[in-house]
Every structure is written in structure tokens, then in C-alpha cells.
Image: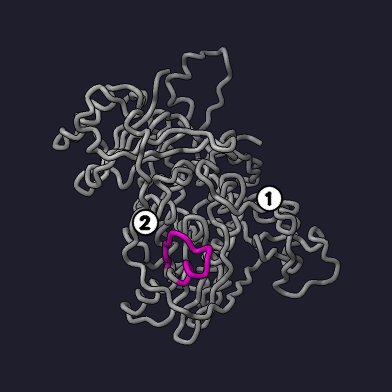
Amino acid sequence: MGTRGLWNLRSAGKWYRLHEPRSRIRSPHEPETVRRIKSIITSLDNLEEWESVSFPSPLQSNLDYVYTIDVDAGTLIITRWETLDGLLQPSPGQIQLSCLDGSHGLTLDSLTRVRDEISEPEDGGAPPTPQVVLNQLRIHPGPPTTLNELQFRISRDFCFVWRFFIDDPMTWRYPSMAFNTIAIGILRIAAWDLEVSSDSEIHYPENRVNFPYWDAPQTDIFWFHRYLVMLHGNINTKSSILAAISKAQLFLEVSHKDAAHLIILSLQHVAFVEVSSKSILCSQILPLFVNTSARHCSPGFRLLSYVLTSSCWKPSLARREQVGVGLPPETLDLILGSCSPKGALTLSQSSFIFQEQYYSTIPQIQHLTLRSFEHSVPCCGKKNRLRGNWVYCPSCYACRHTECAGVRSEPPADSQVICFDCKNGKLCTELVPGGINHIARRFSGEDCEILVAGSPKILRIRFWKPSHLCPELRLLGNLVPVPPRLINFTIRFNGAFAGVAYGLDDS
């Protein structure tokens, strides 16, 4: 098969990547690799074969090496697979490009025997950490909706598709556009700020070397659904969360605002903060990206989706809306269905009655009903009898029936019962390089039982083109039965493919 890999290049502040046919590339122990790098550096005025991208690509399981040439910084980073404590991890090694001068006949391996430490990106905008008191913020979500269950499944599949970007310390760092891009994707799924398209014409790249092409904020602080979102490197200590809050307060001061609801996302965690002129309230720090994110919904994403699809935290719009005549749900559905996906979302954000209807259904997917709720109701996967008969775990925000949780007496509203997994420390809270791929590498998709117009179907993620668009499958002839693998739904962010596609199979 040969050595496989790709090239990243940064020149004049712009990133490029080159993925040559069949991913062929020279290994670091061949002198030809040094000559190839020198040739690239001397040909920066001719980059026609290179693809312009927003950030470098990570090492993926079907690649052996990734070479990242940063002409602006004067460095070369070689990322390869190494095993640490039984875990296969992407391991970057850095050398100065100046070391290649006069290196005739030498190899990169010989030059990297004494290699530089990989420097972290500088965050020059961090203000001094203030000494303030953080009061506890408690958010009490209601029972999960059908939409929440679908969001939990999509978030899991999203993390699986883009796991190599989160697994690789060269791309998963702060500040970086890779972090911004994955973060806005997670936010869009949590808010159902996306399009569900029936367009099956998807470009699956050769050798499955994917790249997220949707637009992302260029800054680490921005407004999203009336929340102020703050991206930060680390928030698992009091000093780090205070530093993030301080940056947000500075932004609010410049914007002439003295209060806001903050969503702070870090490389691993999420926190919810209320800032006002009188006090600062902060929720517990919840894990958002963890090793099991491609198999199970994380506690951070659970609460993030509850917050963005309900009024459990943000002020309700009901107080500013007066409707003389109540509109039946069918009429609201017709109005929302006549809008474009973006128009329906905008309408839901401006009207309380439309917001409730928008998030109580599955917008953009008609006549679809879920039959299993194992991600939103993990105790038994059944949503029936949930209203008024449920408790949630304050550690992982999983919802359970009272009888499943062993609560015999009638529980008060917003009851909290720590679940078995959290009591016994079984909840995954860590994210290590290569961790998501290690746990989910053999994952082939999870069946989701649904009804479409009353007919039982299976909703499955699609990783490849439909069979009739794969010429290589024709070689099999009639020797092996090949399923059609038709694509019925694709998830898109402002028209750009989010990497997640689904098909309907017979039950």
C-alpha cells in the first residue's frame, strides 16, 4: 500500500493543504522528503495544486504521517502515530526549518532526534484575573423532548465523523480556527440551528480525508441565540473560569451592556454564567468533549441543548407577547413549514408561541416519530409516562423515570437524584489525544428505530456514497449482495455539509 499522508502549509498568514492521489507520501527516514520540503518552500508563488483551508488537517487513521510546514513561524511539524500506555495517539515533533539548510543527505528522523517543544498559540487578550465571588447557578431543565433525543444522536455522530480534529493536539488547541469550527458546529446542533436537506449529492473526499468547510466565527467571543458565547482554552479551575468571565465582562463593557447570559466553551468543558452589575452566578463545570463523545452524549451537551431549546434558563418571551386568539398547533406547524429553515428558526426566536412549537416537534423532518429514547431517557429508553414522573441527575443531567431511579414517593418538582454511573465514578470526564478514536474506532453506526408516516424504519448514519455512485462496487457483480445505502437526510450549516448524513432502511 505504501506510505500515506498529507501536507499542511502556512504562508503569508494563509493555510493550505495538499492531499496527493492515493495519499502517497515519503516517510521521514527518506532523504527525498527533505528535498521535497525544500522544493515546496522555494515554490510558494506556485500553489495551484494546493487547497486553501482555514486551518491545518490532523493525522487520521488512514494516514501514516502529516507534515505541517509553517513558513511564517519557520517550523516543520511531523505528526505520526505512537503508542502510549496501550493507546495509539497522534504524536507531533517539531524542528526549525533552518535546520534543513545544509542538510544534504540527511533525513528528517535524524534531524528530529533533538526536537523542539511544540509551542502553544499565544492568547494575548487575557486580562488580569479578578478576585470575585462566584455564586452557584442552578439550571433546572424540564423533561427531554423528541428533538432533544435526535440532537443527542446527531451530536454523537458529529463527534465521530470529526474525531480526528478533536483527537489531535495540533488542531485541538486554543486559540485555533479548528476549535472555533467544531465549537460552532456543536452549538448549531444544540440549538437546532441547521438545515436538514434531502440532497444526496455529497462530495465524499478520496480516501476519506474529510475537512469541515462550514463558516465559523473568527473571534473567540460572539452572540448566539441571545447568549454571549466565550471560547476559552481551559475552564476547569477557578482562576481559568474567572479569566474567561473577565474577558466577557470587558466585551460587555465595550458593548455598553452590564448583564448577559454566558456560555463558556473550552477544549473539554462547558459552563453557564449569569453576569450582572450586582453578582456573578456560575454553574458547575461540565464535561463537553470526552473520550466517549462519539458513543454517548456528554453531560455538557445535554445541558447545552436543554438551554438552547427551552426556557429553562433564558428569559421567556411570553411576557412580551399577547395573542388575542390562540392558534392551534396545526396552524403553527403550517406556518413554520412554509418558511425556509433559517426563516423558521428566526420566527421561533422572535415569538414565544412559535418557539415552543418549533422545539416541541422535529423541524424540517415531516411525519417522523422516534420509537427509542435511550440517549435522553437512558434508564429504559421509553419516553411515555415521563411528564410529572421523572428525576434528573445533577452530575450528568440524564433524565430517568422515578421508578427506574428507585424513587418510591412522589418526587417534588425539579427533583435531582444522582444516577448509578455517577455514584460509582463510571462517567467519562477526560479527553486525551487519540481517545475518541480509540473508543469508537470500530463504531459502524447505531440503529435508530423510527416511524415515517406510520411505517417502521431504521435511521442509520451513512459514511459513504450510495452504492450506485460507487463504481468499485460494480466489480463485485452478483457475488455479494450490496445494500443500496441511499441517503435521505443530510445535516448542513448554512448550506455547507456538516459531515453527517442519514438513510432510511426497512425495519
Q: Amino acid at mark 2?
A: Pro
Front disc: 1 or 2:
2
Which quarter of the rendering shows the C terminus? top right
Above or below — where is 157 with respect to 241?
above
Q: Amino acid at mark 1?
A: Glu
Magenta stretch encompasses residue 454: no
* Residue toward you, 361 or 297: 297
Report whether residue 140 is seen.
Answer: yes
Q: Which percent across, then down, holds residue 308?
A: 51, 65
Q: Secondary structure at mark 2?
A: loop
Q: Which of the colour schemes (rainbow, by chain, secondary structure, one colour) is used?
A: one colour
Which quarter of the rendering shows the N terminus? top left
Residue labelled with disc 2: 175
Q: Which percent across, then down, holds residue 131?
A: 47, 79
Magenta stretch encompasses residue 238: yes
* Residue toward you, 119 or 400: 119
Residue 28 appears left or right of 331: left
Instruction: Find residue 30 and name its label.
Output: none
Report the magenta residues as a range.
229-242
Residue labelled with disc 1: 374
Above or below — where is 76 with respect to 272?
above
Splitting the image into 4 quarters, where does residue 11 fall?
A: top left
Label 1: few (<14), some (14–19) or many (≥20) C-alpha neighbours in 10 Å: some
Of pointers 1 and 2, the one earlier in the residue sequence: 2
